[in-house]
Amino acid sequence: MSTLDARLLAAHEAGDQAALVTLYTQAADEAADEDAAGFYLTQAYIYGLELGHSATCALRARLVAMGRETPAPQSSES
């Protein structure tokens, strides 16, 4: 088991969602292929949404760039 895997498991066990956002983002950055990166980014994004984490917008943008999420709707208010 890699150090990153061990840290992810520990964060899950501790319920440390902020750490999970960071660790899943790191896993996406280190992923061997786009499918794995998309999976890890999705996990980071979900935990980010639950927390209202500051990285949520950037994570969504990365998923949009990968074609795995749709852009946020534009507001019609002027």
Image (tube, helix red, strand yellow):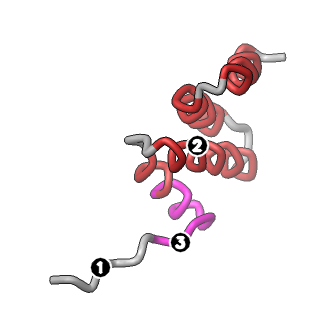
Residue 71, percent from left and from top: 46, 71
Identify which residue is drawn at 42% across, 49% down. Answer: 58
Q: Label 3 crowding class (10 Å Cα cut-off): few <14, some 14-19, many 20+?
A: few
Number of labels in the image equals: 3
Give the residue type that dot 1 points to.
Ser
Circles 2, 1 touching at the beta carbon (< 8 Å): no
Q: Label 1 crowding class (10 Å Cα cut-off): few <14, some 14-19, many 20+?
A: few
Q: Is residue 65 magenta?
A: yes
Location of mark 1 (residue) = 75
Disc 3 and disc 1: Cα gap in Å? 15 Å
Give the residue type that dot 3 points to.
Thr
Location of mark 3 (residue) = 70
Identify which residue is drawn at 60% across, 67% down. Answer: 67
Q: Is residue 65 above or below residue 2?
A: below
Quarter placement of the N terminus: top right
Tell me where the magenta segment starts and ends, as one range: 61-71
Mark 1 falls on what kind of element?
loop
Identify which residue is drawn at 62% across, 64% down. Answer: 68
Q: Quadrant of residue 30?
A: top right
Q: Quadrant of residue 9?
A: top right
Q: Label 2 crowding class (10 Å Cα cut-off): few <14, some 14-19, many 20+?
A: many
Residue 62, percent from left and from top: 50, 54
Location of mark 2 (residue) = 47
